[in-house]
């Protein structure tokens, strides 16, 4: 199992949780972003910088992800593509996407995009909170345990 982080939009507290888990559980982590990010020195953590451009980082993740890997992203189309490759997907807020839930998310995303393009302001997601951080840490630990047991 490897963890792939859609790192351009991933909050720093979430990256820190993943770094600790990578070192503790000896799991390889790759941050993919279109800008260079500072990462801790670790044999388990690496940074992959890709060109700037629409979906370049997402496409790099999809090309490299394998079944049973874990992708950390809020990007719903990236999540759908990763799930098609039998990877696991967790958002930085600790929500796990599955093949059953991603269809609804894609429909809602497309609906909201249509609303925004027609001029309706929908606001964005709520600010990232300590509760989100805690929920992510709990879900990450649970998922790593499940994947290491082969569930």
Image (cartoon, grey):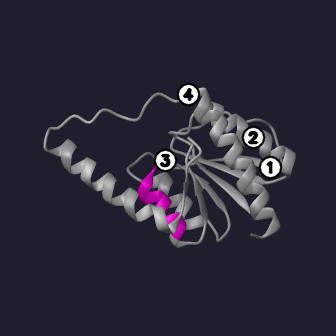
Q: Are marks 3 and 4 in contact (CB under 8 Å)?
A: no
Spatial CA span between label 3 and label 4? 15 Å
Bounds of the magenta segment:
74-83
Quadrant of residue 145 in the image?
bottom right
Report the residue at 65% width, 71% height from top.
67
Q: Disc 2 or disc 1, which is closer to the eye?
A: 2
Residue 129's label in the rendered image is 4
Report the residue at 49% width, 47% height from top.
74
Return the x and y of residue 64 as percentages of the image width and height. Answer: 60, 65
Q: Quadrant of the C terminus?
A: bottom right
Residue 19's label in the rendered image is 2
Instruction: Sort mark 1 into few (<14), some (14-19) or many (20+) by Cα contacts within 10 Å.
Output: some
Instruction: Sort mark 3 into few (<14), some (14-19) or many (20+) by Cα contacts within 10 Å.
Output: some
Marks 3 and 4, the one that precedes in the sequence: 3
Spatial CA span between label 3 and label 2? 18 Å
Return the x and y of residue 136 as percentages of the image width and height. Answer: 64, 42
| Local secondary structure at mark 4 | loop
Instruction: Name the residue that disc number 1 marks.
Output: 44
Q: Disc 3 or disc 2, which is closer to the eye?
A: 3
Instruction: Name the residue that disc number 3 marks.
Output: 74
Marks 4 and 2, the one that precedes in the sequence: 2
| Local secondary structure at mark 2 | helix
């Amino acid at each position: 199992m490897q963890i792939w982080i859609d790192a351009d939009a991933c909050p720093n507290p979430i990256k820190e949780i993943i770094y600790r888990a990578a070192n503790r559980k000896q799991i390889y982590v790759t941050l993919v972003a279109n800008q260079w990010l500072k990462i801790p020195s670790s044999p388990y953590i690496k940074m992959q910088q890709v060109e700037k451009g629409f979906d370049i980082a997402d496409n790099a993740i999809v090309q490299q992800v394998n079944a049973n890997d874990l992708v950390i992203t809020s990007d719903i189309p990236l999540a759908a593509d990763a799930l098609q490759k039998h990877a696991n997907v967790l958002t930085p807020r600790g929500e796990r996407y599955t093949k059953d839930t991603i269809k609804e998310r894609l429909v809602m995303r497309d609906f909201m995009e249509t609303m925004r393009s027609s001029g309706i302001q929908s606001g964005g997601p709520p600010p990232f909170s300590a509760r989100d951080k805690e929920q992510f840490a709990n879900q990450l630990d649970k998922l790593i345990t499940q994947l290491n047991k082969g569930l």
